[in-house]
């Protein structure tokens, strides 16, 4: 009994020690973020970018989605500084998708604003407006007055840019009135609770934007009442920030704008020259200086001082270019402040979760080891009871135990031999697994390299937009490399689009696609249009070149073909020419759909004899959709193929939508149709809008 109590006490002590070793710790990227910000704003942009990439890798490794999104957002600042707008948008969309999964409304609203500002830099104002209004709605739903007012400021800024390009002035004027109303509301709201939401500088920014808005309305509508309203808000700027030197100079610049509206050009120029003399003692921002010299240029122009007007305009443009970098730095500091606040909340939350986890784990470990101790104790007592019975029953118990012991030894030796054999087999299996992994890595490396080669060699979606500005391409591949390719060409008034898909997916399809594109380019290089274009001749010559390239091997060993459509749009005569090899196109014209079919045989099919050309007249804004056969043959959740009837229904559903929304709607329809069914072929859809004359 003493022996059992000793064992029990030892096991309980071990359980207590194990239970106390609960996991603890936390992930914190604060130091890396702060170092990256210091590098970025001290001019070490490449080192800041390297730190950001390291943070992205660490967040991916630890599956920390919140910090991964923050790292993507910071990386977009570097891309914006370098002028890589496409990479900036890619990082922002990655961050947006993560915030959507986390259901972080505040971050979603802020990221929509960042993307809208990037699109505004590209002069894609309509897309930027859509994202700004999304941000405003989300920020309003979660009662984030700060983010809502920041987005209205961005919306106001790019509305001004849009007015300078004279695009849809009536629509923008309507939006400007809405912005003025909203800005008035936010100024009142922030005065009621300024300390909690925004500091005085943000209130001053809103007042300044209201001044600019009213001055713009006074110019456009030639109504001096708006100039009086602007003067009222100039006084509010001075009152809010106090009569400080810089603030006072900025208010004088605003007053000069009011003077220009009131056509007091001499007074305005005199006031501006006085401000210019003070710029050496009171440093103004690049934006203020740009506005100062812009007003001076305008006043000189109205006073017929052409030389001075040109001189001041050049200085204004120089400071405008410097303003962009300052704006990016300010956005970065705002992002850093919000990020650090989120980090504090996240750290406290994680510490609480880890403490609860440690306590629960400790309790589970104690209970687990206690059950084991009780079980072992029960087994030991039972073994002693059985042993006593055997000893008391007869004298042969010892001999039987010896026999059992001998058998047990033989069994142990057999187990040892089996374990040795298993270890040898495991070693061999591991070697084979390493070999397979190495081969797989080499194959995947080759495929990825082939993908980069294919991406460089193939035409891009931007090539289509160069000929057909309103167009989109939807590609959904089943493997890294694809058998789909397209080609565009121009014969004076005739614009040609070729869409093709190989019958095989993956690497075989990509190689055949490269051969087909090479043959197609050679045909177009040698083809002479002479005012009359024949898509059937293009297909026939391409088929001949492809067969000549493949030689006898094509007929004997290969069974792959290419489904292809050659589409030509004659913008002068309003006609569509089409010839297809086992691939059709659909034309939505006058609210009706017409299908243009080609021959039933694919390119490279030995049974093919000839190709035909179909001609169709169309009206302006007609839309053409090219679906490859993978769409028609794809089986959906109801175990039926998509089919031509559903294609017609889909076109009737998406055609009335704005062209910019059709791609997203079409993608959603395909997602709903596929459900959890695996895709069997490379889906390729190209759509163009015939508004090119």
Image: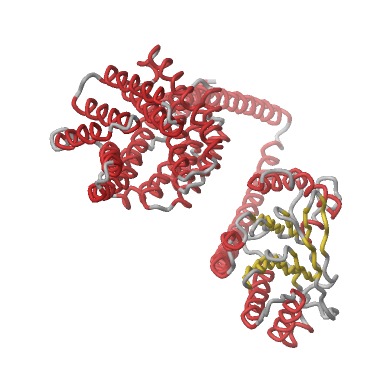
Q: Nearer the viewer, residue 86 or 288?
A: 288
Q: Is residue 97 left or right of residue 316?
A: right
Q: Residue at x 44, y 43 (%)?
A: 164
> From this viewpoint, is residue 13 visible?
no
> From this viewpoint, is residue 272 visible?
yes
Q: Quadrant of residue 502?
A: bottom right
Quarter containing the N terminus: top right
Q: Residue at x 38, y 38 (%)?
A: 29
Q: Nearer the viewer, residue 270 or 79?
A: 270
Q: Residue at x 37, y 25 (%)?
A: 227
Q: Nearer the viewer, residue 454 or 138?
A: 138
619 lies above or below 211:
below
34 lies above or below 208:
below
Q: Quadrant of residue 70?
A: top left
324 lies above or below 549:
above
72 lies above or below 371:
below
Q: Is residue 481 left or right of residue 188?
A: right
Q: Position of residue 581 (x, y in %)?
A: 79, 71
Q: Position of residue 90 (x, y in %)?
A: 50, 48
Q: Is residue 80 left or right of residue 556?
A: left
Q: Position of residue 62 (x, y in %)?
A: 48, 41
Q: Position of residue 534 (x, y in %)?
A: 74, 76
Q: What is the basis of the colouring in this image? A: secondary structure
Q: Residue at x 58, y 35 (%)?
A: 101
Q: How many marks?
A: 0
């Amino acid at each position: 009994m003493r022996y059992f109590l000793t064992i029990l006490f030892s096991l309980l002590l071990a359980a207590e020690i194990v239970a106390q070793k609960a996991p603890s710790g936390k992930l914190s990227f604060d130091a890396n973020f702060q170092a990256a910000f210091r590098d970025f704003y001290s001019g070490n942009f490449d080192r800041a970018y390297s730190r950001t990439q390291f943070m992205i890798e660490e967040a991916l490794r630890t599956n920390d989605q919140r910090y991964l999104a923050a790292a993507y957002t910071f990386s977009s600042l570097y891309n914006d500084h370098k002028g890589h707008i496409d990479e900036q948008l890619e990082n922002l969309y990655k961050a947006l998708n993560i915030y959507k999964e986390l259901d972080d409304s505040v971050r979603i609203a802020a990221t929509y604003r960042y993307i809208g500002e990037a699109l505004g830099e590209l002069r894609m104002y309509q897309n930027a407006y859509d994202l700004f209004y999304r941000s405003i709605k989300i920020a309003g739903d979660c009662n984030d007055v700060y983010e809502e007012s920041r987005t209205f400021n961005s919306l106001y800024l790019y509305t001004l840019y849009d007015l300078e390009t004279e695009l849809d002035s009536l629509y923008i004027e309507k939006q400007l009135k809405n912005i003025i109303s909203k800005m008035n509301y936010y100024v009142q709201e922030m005065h009621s609770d300024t300390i909690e939401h925004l500091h005085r500088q943000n209130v001053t920014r809103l007042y300044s934007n209201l001044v600019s808005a009213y001055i713009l309305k006074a110019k456009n509508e030639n109504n001096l009442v708006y100039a009086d309203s602007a003067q009222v808000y100039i006084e509010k700027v001075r009152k809010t920030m106090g009569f400080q030197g810089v603030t006072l100079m900025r208010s004088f610049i605003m007053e000069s704008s009011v003077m220009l509206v009131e056509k007091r050009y001499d007074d305005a120029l005199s006031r501006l020259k006085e401000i210019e003399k003070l710029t050496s003692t009171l440093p103004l921002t690049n934006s203020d200086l740009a506005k100062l010299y812009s007003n001076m240029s305008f006043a000189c122009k109205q006073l017929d001082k052409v030389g001075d007007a040109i001189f001041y305009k050049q200085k204004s443009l120089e400071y405008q270019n410097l303003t962009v970098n300052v704006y990016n730095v300010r956005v970065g500091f705002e992002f850093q402040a919000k990020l650090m606040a989120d980090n504090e909340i996240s750290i406290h939350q994680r510490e609480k979760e880890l403490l609860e986890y440690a306590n629960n784990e400790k309790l589970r470990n104690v209970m687990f080891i206690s059950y084991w101790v009780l079980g072992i104790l029960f087994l030991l007592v039972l073994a002693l009871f059985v042993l006593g019975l055997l000893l008391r029953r007869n004298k042969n118990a010892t001999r039987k135990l010896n026999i059992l012991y001998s058998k047990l030894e033989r069994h142990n030796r057999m187990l040892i031999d089996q374990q040795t054999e298993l270890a040898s087999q495991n070693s061999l299996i591991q070697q084979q697994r390493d070999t397979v992994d190495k081969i797989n890595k080499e194959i995947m490396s080759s495929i990825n390299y082939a993908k980069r080669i294919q991406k460089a060699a193939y035409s891009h979606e931007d090539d289509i937009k160069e000929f057909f500005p309103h167009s989109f391409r939807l590609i959904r591949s089943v493997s890294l490399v694809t058998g789909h390719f397209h080609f565009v060409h121009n014969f004076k008034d005739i614009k040609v689009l070729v869409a093709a898909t190989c019958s095989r997916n993956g690497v075989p399809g990509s190689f055949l696609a490269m051969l087909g594109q090479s043959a197609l380019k050679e045909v177009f290089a040698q083809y002479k249009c002479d005012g009359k274009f024949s898509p059937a001749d293009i297909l026939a010559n391409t088929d001949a070149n492809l067969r000549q390239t493949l030689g006898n091997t094509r007929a004997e060993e290969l069974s792959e073909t290419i489904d292809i459509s050659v589409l030509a749009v004659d913008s002068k005569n309003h006609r569509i020419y089409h010839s297809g090899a086992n691939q059709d196109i659909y034309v939505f014209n006058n609210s009706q759909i017409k299908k243009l079919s080609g021959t039933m045989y694919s390119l490279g099919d030995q049974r093919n004899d000839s190709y035909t050309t179909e001609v169709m007249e169309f009206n302006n804004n007609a839309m053409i959709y090219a679906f490859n056969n993978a769409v028609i043959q794809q089986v959906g959740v109801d175990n039926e193929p998509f089919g031509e009837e559903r294609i017609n229904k889909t076109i009737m559903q998406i055609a009335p939508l704005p062209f910019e929304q059709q791609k997203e709607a079409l993608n959603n329809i395909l997602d709903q149709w596929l459900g959890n069914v695996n895709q069997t072929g490379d889906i390729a859809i190209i759509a163009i809008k015939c508004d090119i004359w």
